[in-house]
Image (cartoon, grey):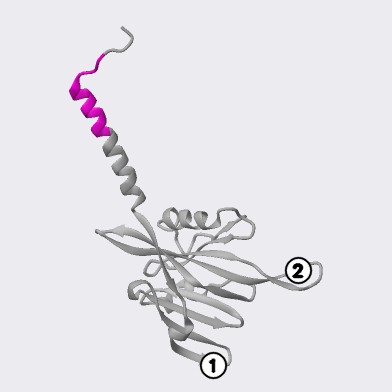
């Protein structure tokens, strides 16, 4: 007898198990989502401006505070109500740089609602062309962890050298930021 007939309840049990497996996969896929906001410095409030730079308070995702500063031809971006006291407020790329206007917020479902856990922002550093001394513009995705008293850069992904840089950045935001300690952990460099 090549095909033995299974009892009906075993078939139903197997089907229910399969449905629950797909449901949990779908639920896990929903644990992290992206939302996008624009950084429009014209819409931001100037906190301080002098000959050395300017500091802005800008609207973020659903009113979440966003701090943007420019000084010495470099940008700084931090988050939260204590954004100026966070490590991110003093972090930038070493080269002169600018930032993109589109900011990706990675959200995680906590206590039934989505909350920001990280951001992904494209920075454009000036890169010296070693052959002729000319500058060209790079493209670095900066993943920043958002957590009170622990907000900082987690990863730098060179989008010109790495295929799938956006997906890598999202993966880092969803999986690496949770346990990242801003005081002791080193920023991930991709490629290293």
Expressed as whole percent of the image width and height from the top left, the position of residue 91 reads 53, 72
Residue 25 appears in the figure? yes
Q: Answer with the quarter of the image where residue 78 lies.
A: bottom left
Residue extent of the magenta highlight: 5-17
Residue at x-position 34% and y-position 43%? 25
Q: Which quadrant does the N terminus fall into? A: top left
Residue at x-position 46% and y-position 53%? 171
Q: How many residues crowd around disc 1 within 10 Å: few (fewer than 14), some, or many (20 or more)? A: few
Q: Which disc is residue 129 wearing?
A: 2
Residue 44 appears in the figure? no
Q: Answer with the quarter of the image where residue 12 lies.
A: top left
Q: Answer with the quarter of the image where residue 188 lies.
A: bottom right
Q: Which residue is mark 1?
A: 50
Q: Spot the residue most to the bottom.
A: 50
60 within the magenta span: no
Q: Spot the residue most to the top.
A: 1
Vertical placement of residue 48 versus 159, above or below: below
Expressed as whole percent of the image width and height from the top left, the position of residue 86 reads 44, 73
Q: Which quadrant does the C terminus fall into? A: bottom right
Magenta stretch secondary structure, dominant: helix
- Helix, strand or loop at mark 2: loop
Expressed as whole percent of the image width and height from the top left, the position of residue 117 reads 38, 63
- Helix, strand or loop at mark 1: strand
Of residues 28 and 172, which is closer to you in this image? 28
Give the mark, 1 or 2, whose residue is nearer the N terminus.
Answer: 1
Of residues 21 and 77, which is closer to you in this image? 21
């Amino acid at each position: 007898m090549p095909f033995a007939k299974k009892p009906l309840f075993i078939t139903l049990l197997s089907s229910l198990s399969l449905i629950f497996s797909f449901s949990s996969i779908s639920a896990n896929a929903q644990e992290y989502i992206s939302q996008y906001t624009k950084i429009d410095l014209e819409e931001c409030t100037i906190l301080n401006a002098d000959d050395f730079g300017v500091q802005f308070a800008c609207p973020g995702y659903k009113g979440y505070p966003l701090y943007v500063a420019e000084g010495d031809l470099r940008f700084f971006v931090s988050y939260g109500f204590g954004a100026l006291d966070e490590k991110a407020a003093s972090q930038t790329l070493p080269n002169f740089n600018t930032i993109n206007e589109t900011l990706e917020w990675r959200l995680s479902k906590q206590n039934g609602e989505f909350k920001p856990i990280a951001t992904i922002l494209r920075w454009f550093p000036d890169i010296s062309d070693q052959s002729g001394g000319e500058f060209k513009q790079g493209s670095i995705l900066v993943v920043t962890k958002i957590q009170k008293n622990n907000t900082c850069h987690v990863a730098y992904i060179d989008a010109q050298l790495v295929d799938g840089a956006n997906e890598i950045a999202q993966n880092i935001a969803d999986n690496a930021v949770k346990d990242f300690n801003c005081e002791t952990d080193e920023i991930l460099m991709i490629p290293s």
